[in-house]
Amino acid sequence: MILLAGFLLPGCATIYRARQAQKSDQAPPGERTVTAAEVSLSEGSTLTLEQAVAIALQYHPAMVQAQQNLVIAQKQTRLAISGYIPSLTGQGSYRRATGNVQAPASTTPGLSAPSPPSNESSDFWSAGISAEQLIWDFGRTDSAIRQASAQQRAAEANLRATTNTVAFQVKLAYYQLAQAQALAQVAEDTVHQFQVHLDQAKVLFEVGRRIQYDVTKAQVDLGHAQLNLISARNAVKTARAALNSAMGLAEEPGYRITEPAAVEQTATLEELMALAREHQPELQAAIAEERAASMAVNGAIANLFPSLTFSAGYNWTGADFPLVWNWFISPAVVIQDLLAIPRKTSQIDQAVAQLRSARARRAAQEQLIYLHLSQAVAEREDAKQRLELSTLVAQQAQENVDLVNERYKVGRASAVEVTDAQVALSQAQSDQVTARFDYLAAVAQVQRTIGEK
């Protein structure tokens, strides 16, 4: 009974977990959309970049899918290992039946004729236990285990790749929201400056120092700035929705974000590519899949050979107790499907083709990493140079606005000059903001491409 309980209890626990998993109303966050309250986000709360990444890594559905894919691969490995575990079978039966037989056409002299059919019946009891153990199958089971282990390593690498991708998407969305807010602030400042200019134009017009054109021009400029502000504010809303989605949310909690910290990255393309070849998870997954395909070739070849098994058993049979007992042992050489050699050789060729395909995917992945890394490094350097130059241009544009405004007050600058100066400042500030966040995004892309979170 203790032995029976030892077999049944784990099965009962597994069934219980399976039944619980079927209850969709009890699904944990990640298998369902997490709420803002569950991640402690509310109106006015502050969300840092690190917190946003942590939320996504814990609750984003892509993470749950990758984690469960790893669980599947782990169970496949255990299933492959079970090929070396002996099988134990028990059976018991009871039968009550009549024993009527058909009378022969002729009766041998000296032998009595069979009794006529009747409803008389008798008992028959049977019970037994048997075990079977694989001794050797020329590497077929070993290849299956190695193949499953390689696929498990591929699933582990894919989980790391998903982690990096989810973290990158959150970083990118966070930077885009910060950029949208900064551009909205530039638009608000521009509206404010044009409003100040309009007020100045009205005052100067009233005292006869400016003409009506200046007032009208200032009103038009203010209207254009207000239109740009509307677009900028809508861009903020869109960026917030993108960040919420990247974290795995389907609502707007109304949080505030902090100013992203400055980062500095100076590694060369060659240095980064060396790191990518060693750590990049998509490449590691491709290497593991190539290994699994190689083990599949071994398994297909081993399938040509027989397997050696050993079985033994003990049984009890009889019509009355105590039952009669017997035992048996049976070593066996099993050759499956002797006429299937063409099919098995085709399976070998198929496995070889899959191996070559996996090897080509590995090469393609390495080349794709190089391409993405080259692009990311180029974008990083481009953004860095644009940031340096746009910062200088923004300073000069601000000085120009201050100078033109002072000249306008004393009648030495026209309304067109004021507009041109303010537009140039707004554009320079926008370029500075864009370059800054382009640099942050490029650094994040480099980190993702080399396998860093």
Image (cartoon, rainbow, N blue to C red):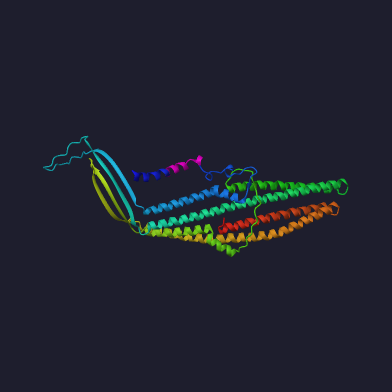
Residue sitting at x 75%, y 54%: 425
Q: Which residues are magenta?
A: 14-26
Quadrant the C terminus occupies = bottom right
| Residue 116 coordinates in the image, percent (x, y) | 18, 36
Residue sitting at x 25%, y 49%: 327
Res. 434 image quadrant: bottom right
Residue sitting at x 33%, y 49%: 88
Q: Residue furthest bottom?
A: 270
Observer able to see residue 336: no
The one nearer the camera, 263 or 303, is 263
Res. 262 image quadrant: bottom right
The one nearer the camera, 338 or 152, is 152
| Residue 426 coordinates in the image, percent (x, y) | 74, 53
Q: Main secondary structure of the magenta part?
A: helix
Residue sitting at x 52%, y 43%: 28
Instruction: Judge from the rendering whether residue 126 lies leftward or rightward of residue 24; answer left or right.
Output: left
